[in-house]
Amino acid sequence: MKSLVIATSNPHKVEEIGAVLGQLGIECLPLGDAGVPEPKEDGATFEENARIKARAYAKALGRTVLADDSGLEVDALGGAPGVHSAYYAGVGATRAERDPANNARLLRELAGVPDAQRTARFVCVLCIARPDGTIVAESRGTFDGRIGHAPRGANGFGYDPLLVLADGRTSAELSSDEKNARSHRGNALRALVPKLA
């Protein structure tokens, strides 16, 4: 495997993944404007959605593709928002509109829940598929904490301002380097490397 297309329009994700897989001599290419319609992610788990994306893009592009699916699991909510993390509140056309609405809904649903029961984690599942749809490798990484009572921090996006870590800071209060070293995506990438080496 000399190169992979990373199934995302986020250049930061491509850089982050490329920094790790580049050490194995694997070139990570952006999806770019490939004109491939985004597949419908209707899986019940992060694993199912990552497979759907990896297979769909690999077959459409005729290339080996790495796709991910990620989100937040909150134990007091039975694992919700889970695979519905990005659209949890059901409103907003852009991330700038959805993120505050999703965070507000999460805080409403956890109102009155004591700190000890607000345990949660970010989850990232990575999946690599060949052009024929064969799954080559998969991995899962988590980033554990608990849900705070109000957003804090200016870094990151999504639920980062609400996930309070063991050191008392939120994910949004970490520098980019600190977050990459500890994050669910970083942990999933580190778990993937031995499967590709």
Image (cartoon, rainbow, N blue to C red):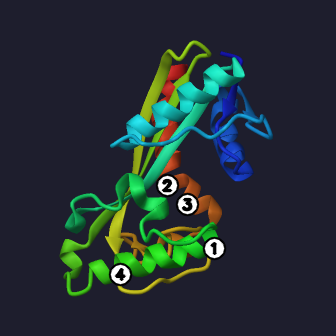
Mark 2 vs mark 1: which is more N-terminal? 1
Q: Crowdedness of circle 2 by 10 Å Cα count: few (<14), some, many (20+)?
A: many
Q: Which image quarter: residue 132?
A: top right
Marks 3 and 2: in contact by CB < 8 Å? yes
Q: How far apart are the alpha carbons under marks 2 and 1? A: 22 Å
* Residue tagged 2: 183
* 117, 97: nearer the viewer: 97
Q: Quadrant of the C terminus?
A: top right
Indicate the amino acid at tag 1.
Ala
Which one is earlier in the sequence, the residue at label 1 or at label 3?
Answer: 1
Query: Given contact means CB atoms under 8 Å apart, are the residues at marks 2 and 4 in contact?
Result: no
Q: Which residue is mark 4?
A: 107
Return the x and y of residue 104 as percentages of the image width and height.
42, 81
Quadrant showing the N terminus: top right
What is the C-alpha distance between the residues marked 2 and 3?
5 Å
Q: Which residue is located at x 26 percent, y 85 percent?
A: 111
Residue wearing tag 3: 179
Q: Which amino acid is tagged 3?
A: Lys
Counting every numbered tag in the picture gives 4
Query: In whole angstroms, how far apart are the C-alphas of marks 1 and 3?
Result: 21 Å
Q: Residue at x 75, y 38 (%)?
A: 30
Q: Nearer the viewer, residue 196 or 83?
A: 83
What kind of residue is marked 4?
Leu
